[in-house]
Amino acid sequence: MRRLCFGFLVLAALLAVSCGKKVPAAAVSGAPEAAAISPDYADVVFPYNFQPLNFNILSPGDKFITRVTGANGGEIVVRGAAVRFPLRAWKQLTDANRDADLTYTVYARRNGRWTQLADFKNHVSSDPIDEYLTYRLLAPSYEFYTAFQIRQRNLTTGRDREVYNNRMHYNPREQQCMNCHQFRNYRTEDWQMHIRQVLGGTLIITGDEARKVNLKTDRTISAGVYPAWHPTENMIVYSVNRTRQFFHEKNIHKLEVQDPASDLIAYDIDRNEVRKVAGDPLAFETFPAWSPDGRTLYFSSAQQPDVAQFSSDSIAICFDKIYYDIVRMSYDPETKAFGAPETVYDAQSQELSAQVPRISPDGRYLLFSLGEYGTFHIWHRGSDLWVQDLATGASYPLAEANSDDADSYHNWASGGRWIVFTSRRDDGLFTRTYFTYFDRDGKAHKAFMLPNTDPAETYDRVLSYNVPEFTVEPIRQSVKTLSHYISQPALQATYAE
Amino acid sequence: MKSEKWFRWGAAALLVVALALLVLKDDVLAKMYALSLWPDMTFYLTSGLQPGVLLPVLGSVLTQLCPRPWMATVLILGSLAALMLLCSKVSGRRLRALLPALLVFCFLCGLDYAVYAMRAQGLLFSQTLGLCFALLLVRGWQRIENKTWARLYANLVGMFAYPLIGVYGIVATLAICLEALCEGKRRWDYLVSLLVYGALMPYVWAAGIFTHIDARYTWYAGLPYMDFVGHGVRFVPLALALACTALLPALRSWEPKPRAWQPVAAALAAGLCVWGFTFWNANFHLELAMERAAEQHDWEKVLRCARRSEHPTRVMVMYRNVALMYRGELCSAMFTYPNDSVPIDTPSQISQTEVCGVPVFFYNGLINYSARWAWEMSMMFQRTLERYKYLAKVALFTGQENPALVRKYLDIIGTCPFEGKWVRKYRGYLEDPSLLAQDEEYRMFLLLDNFEENRRPSSEVVENTLLTHYTIQPDPHGTMLQLALAAAMTRKDIDTFWYYYDRLRAEGGKIPRHVGEAAILFAYIERNQDAVDAVAQDLGGVNSLTVQRFIQFSGEASRASGEAAVAEAFKERYGDTYWYYSSFVKSLTTD
């Protein structure tokens, strides 16, 4: 009897296995409609070393089978409306199909009959993407942030881990905010992030050492805000910003974040000194970024609006008349001297505002976001990604990657072929991380969302993913270690003329 | 035998008292449902990764099964009965077995304004469940205490109960070890267990698995520790319940000599305990009732509640004004109700915005601010069904939002088992926007949306924001004009009042009662006879009731002296007029 039962079990298991990987033989083929999927991964170019692009099928049907076949061979068949590809099989398929297409065939069972929907394709690029992405995960609130995290995603496997969360030093009376994590040269040996309010300071990690610094001096208008690590020197340029936010009663943008004053400072890590880099009293300088050779500093700069008695409060009136250009200054590593500012992209004359300059690793392209006005483009629906070819001076939008909603905070991968950015294109509120392929002709391709293992979670989670930063290796510190560093008193930086 | 009888009577009495109190507090129960949510992935990513995860999850699930207060009452009574039964099994059927249930009930009755700002999830049931689980674990050990693997069982409880039920697992370990020690079983073994599991296990878990938890709170896992600070007294019953649960099993065989006065003293002590820990504040309960009635558009009930407090909070005043606005009676009835600005009675640091910002901004048409505060509150405290409902309505009403956002909110609300009807209604609006025209809230929103865009700094108090919003509108009409006049009258702002009064006259139609009262009073105060005559003319001539009554009022006011006595006398005769509000209701705090 026992043997009989065992036999039945083996038979059932074999049947289940053999049936699970078959596509329907008698499917009605050639249905004109393509499968509706979420996230939209149809016709995208993605790196061969990327994690599985799991998705949900939204097309009608009570059962689904998805078959992915590679032009160079290989196949994966997955059952169900939630399409999750096994990691190993996915890797084999994408590895075998570098610079080739993957074709997705979706079968939907409707009224007891299988229907084959129109195929869609992906292209597998042989340009690899950096292995890690560090980002902030938080709800889209405005002033209160009791629970949020910095997380790191392994983009090749999809594994996600917490780097730090602000409940490690929970205090019900005062919140803790973390922002602006940034790494030097895509490595995690040297990196930094800011802690605001509880145990506030800038945590600077250099190799095995960690230091928490208070960058606010009586000569600067704030502590360091947006950072730019010098690629070779122990120096970080920061913007210092007096930031105001105010809320629209009925405007669709809901919120404005503006800086009625901002300058640039340079922090010498070895000497624990800050000095002013750009401090025109009638200009707002912000979002610094180094060229890869460390000889040019790019930043955004706006002229103070021409209103009588301009003040921190009156910025609520003239907020839509502030336009930022992209400006650069030369830097001489020998003398540590900065040159005169020179406008690279003149947005002001077009009554537009250019933000967050980022130079491609080969030094050829300037990537920035261009919106209608102001500084905080994630709240501006008209914001798009643009590039300027620094060799020719030609500027153009990344039309294939942009959307009708806010496309903002962006970064290059170390190879220069992939761009990560944040976008609100899905629902207008929750920021998601998107990637786009930037080909050798300087053209972007259709952007695709950072996938999650559970495709439903990708879309349903009511959290925003922002400040995405690539690295080629994982962060070396544990949550507990970072928590320990953060609990240390902040070292006061000094001001040098 | 006698003690068993007293236990039965005591349990019955406690359940009856609990039933009565829960019926009285039905609005608190309704609010607790609205402030809960079916556990989702976000929940697991925030609270779910903590030791004691089972309690908030099950607590939220049970709360979500109680969309009506009577359902919550039944479930709470059931959980209290289960707790009493378990405790009696573990510690003997004596009166003292009622202590954990009594104390946890006192904790529930003590819930005050802090419910608006609770970070702990499923609080209505989570702590009772924690005590039940702890007692179940102890009972399990008692069933096998003489078997050889009783030690193994105790070790397993010590090791694995903590991540699931938090500090209640430690309580179970303590109870087992204490009972074993008291009964003289393998004293050293159990003492070591007590030390290892009771004192060290939380640190082992914190170091190994829960590395992302603030180590200071290791010992509070499973308790609503995020709400402890500044509210210590409220948690005294909970702490005592934990102590009782740990100690009672060890006292299983302790049988003091029965005395006749003991049951009476116990009843008195229990009564005092319930009375002392219960939050009785009338305004709190009226506010909750008004909020619930407003949500159901039962404006009559909102106004009935407004009449029941002589000294309302501004939150109550705002709900009352919303009800009057919906009934079109704002400027003709608002001063017939009590007006005051009694502070919110709570030791917690809770602001007016936290108590009512989301609904009141919504009802007043400032839906951007309603959505903003819904998110702020979700981040500060927790995501709740109520907040998601407002977010969904705002996203739908603005018409500018991506439909995907509305769908996302509706999907989340749809995970709650009793919200299908609500979700179907709003999904219907999404699929056929023409249906929105039938929605009473949307129709009112369209009337209130007729204002000029403005921007405000970060944090302002709700009422102050609203009053400013209405009194800076350059050209309001209809309902907005009524609101502007009401705001000017509330602020006793004469210049602003005249500005809107002239617009009202230009619109034509009848002058609302309080507007007429204010107009004649302000004209009189400014000693402008032409204005007085003009207003009198607007009100139907000098023989009109309002003018005649004002002549009487001003005559009496000019002869009166001694403010307190005068105020009382005038309240009796003119308490329903703007004149009384303007002259005698002073020091109102609206910001």
Image: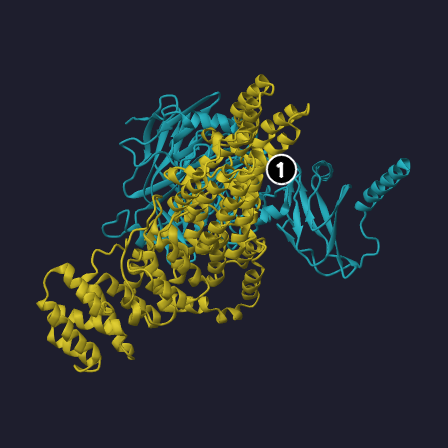
Chain colours: A cyan, B yellow
Give the residue drawn at x 52%, y 48%.
Answer: B12
Which sits in the foreground, B260 or A239?
B260
Q: Looking at this rendering, what residue extends furthest in the front direction?
A: B260
Locate the N terminus of chain B and report the quarter of the image it occupies.
Answer: top right
Q: Is residue B473 visible?
A: yes
Give the residue drawn at x 51%, y 36%.
Answer: B222
Horizontal side, residue B232 vs residue B42: left or right: left
**Residue at mark 1: chain:** A
Horizontal side, residue A310 vs residue B531: left or right: right
Q: Quadrant of residue A194?
A: top left
**Residue A486 against residue B286 in the figure, above or below:** above
Question: For the residue marked with disc 1, what is the amino acid?
Answer: Gly
Q: Is residue A442 visible?
A: no
Give the residue drawn at x 46%, y 50%.
Answer: B17
Q: Position of residue B119 (x, y in %)?
A: 45, 43
Q: Position of residue A69 (x, y in %)?
A: 76, 45
Horizontal side, residue B70 vs residue A45: left or right: left
Horizontal side, residue B186 vs residue B436: left or right: right
Which sits in the foreground, A155 or A123?
A155
For label 1, the residue is A158
Which sits in the foreground, B180 or B587?
B180
Q: Position of residue B10 (x, y in %)?
A: 50, 44
User: Is label 1 in a helix, a strand or a loop?
Assistant: loop
**Residue B117 against residue B521 in the figure, above or below:** above
Which sits in the foreground, B542 or A237?
B542
Q: Position of residue B534 (x, y in %)?
A: 17, 78
